């Protein structure tokens, strides 16, 4: 082999390796990895803070957001997270200068332990009514037993009212529209509203999540045969929502830790106005879904 031919071959192989690495990097950039059990984002308490307009972060940790929407007619809490986090949520609401008993409605992104495990206790503490989509209400009312996924049960909670697809939940000047995006749970609900910042209007999306279960099949699940169809519908819905401000059921989806830092160092610019992250993760999840669908149907 002549030197030039050998060099070309090396270059070609190096090209394949670099290209491969690049593709892997692109993939992981689209769907950030789930923080492991030891990751401090799951345990370290964060101070409550103002996100935008009438919306505040009141979750105990950045990994398990809980949101407060305020109005003169009372407040709404989205996601109670774990039962043991409820006292922290209550303390955070009060730290921000609001009264926990002014919370009138409790909503959720989806009925998994880490989002609705504290519903029963929070309902008791606030006297608020719990509203959920019918399929997720069944999971809340059975403490997780009605879910198609296997998992440890939690304290069952009461649901006072069902939400229908596209319903607008209103309280004072809060108006949150429900968009059913089933798949992760059968009643997974993505919420939208408009917010104002510095005199401008923005579309906000609070994403319920479109991650597949890693421990059970996507195709032909005995307790959820319509799962592939539901995911397809949910991706179509999620991709058409107008988004300026992206919030979600877990902080790592939208670089929450990073944004908390930015808020401290540069409070003039609201870091939550950032639509690219939303489309990147939705498209990343969709790609994983399509790959898995193809694999399981083969
Ligand atoms: Zn979940």
Image (cartoon, rainbow, N blue to C red):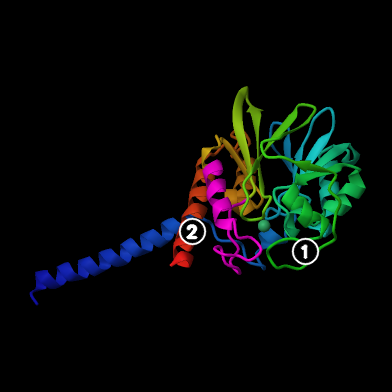
Which residue is found at the position 54% from the left and 39% from the top? Answer: 274
Which numbered disc, 2 or 1, marks the residue closer to the eye? 1
Q: Quadrant of residue 176?
A: top right
Q: Secondary structure at mark 1?
A: loop
Residue 198 pos. (x, y %):
63, 25
Q: Secondary structure at mark 2?
A: helix
Q: Main secondary structure of the magenta part?
A: loop
Residue 278 pos. (x, y %):
54, 44
Q: Quadrant of residue 61?
A: bottom right
Which residue is found at the position 52% from the left and 44% from the top? Answer: 236
Mark 1 closeness class: few <14, some 14–19, many ≥20 residues within 10 Å: some
- Magenta residue check for 225: yes
- Picture quarter with ligand 1: bottom right
**Left or right side of 2 for 229:** right
> Is residue 285 visible from the viewing direction of this image?
yes
Label drawn at residue 49: none
Depicted 188 relative to depicted 53: above or below: below
**Left or right side of 243 for 43:** right
Q: What residue did someone put label 1 on?
A: 145
Q: Quadrant of the C terminus?
A: bottom left
Q: What residue did someone put label 2 on?
A: 288
Residue 154 pos. (x, y %):
81, 63
Residue 178 pos. (x, y %):
68, 39
In the depicted view, which residue is nearer to us: 42 or 108?
108
> Is residue 47 visible from the viewing direction of this image?
no
What segment is highlighted magenta in the picture? 209-238
């Amino acid at each position: 082999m002549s030197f030039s031919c050998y060099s070309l071959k090396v270059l070609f192989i190096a090209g394949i390796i670099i290209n491969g690495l690049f593709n892997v990097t692109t993939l992981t950039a689209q769907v950030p990895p789930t923080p492991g059990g030891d990751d401090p984002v799951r345990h370290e308490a964060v101070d409550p803070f103002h996100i935008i307009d009438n919306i505040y972060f009141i979750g105990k940790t950045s990994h398990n957001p809980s949101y407060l929407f305020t109005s003169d007619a009372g407040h709404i809490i989205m996601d109670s997270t774990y039962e043991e986090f409820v006292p922290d949520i209550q303390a955070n609401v009060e730290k921000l200068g609001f009264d926990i008993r002014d919370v009138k409605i409790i909503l959720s992104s989806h009925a998994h332990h880490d989002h609705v495990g504290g519903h029963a206790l929070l309902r008791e503490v606030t006297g608020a009514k719990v509203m959920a989509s019918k399929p997720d209400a069944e999971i809340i009312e059975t403490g997780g037993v009605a879910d198609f996924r296997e998992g440890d049960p939690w304290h069952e909670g009461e649901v006072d009212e069902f939400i229908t697809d596209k319903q607008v939940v209103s309280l004072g000047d809060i108006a949150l529209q429900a968009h059913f995006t089933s798949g992760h749970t059968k009643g997974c609900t993505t919420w939208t509203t408009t917010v104002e910042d510095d005199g401008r209007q923005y579309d906000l999306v609070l994403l319920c999540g479109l991650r597949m279960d890693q421990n059970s099949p996507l195709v032909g699940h005995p307790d959820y045969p319509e799962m592939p169809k539901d995911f397809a519908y949910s991706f179509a819905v999620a991709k058409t929502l107008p988004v300026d401000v992206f919030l979600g059921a877990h902080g790592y989806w939208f670089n929450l830790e990073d944004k908390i830092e930015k808020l401290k160092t540069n409070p003039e610019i609201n870091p939550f106005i950032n639509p690219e992250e939303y489309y990147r993760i939705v498209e990343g999840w969709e790609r994983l879904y399509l790959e898995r669908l193809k694999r399981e149907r083969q």
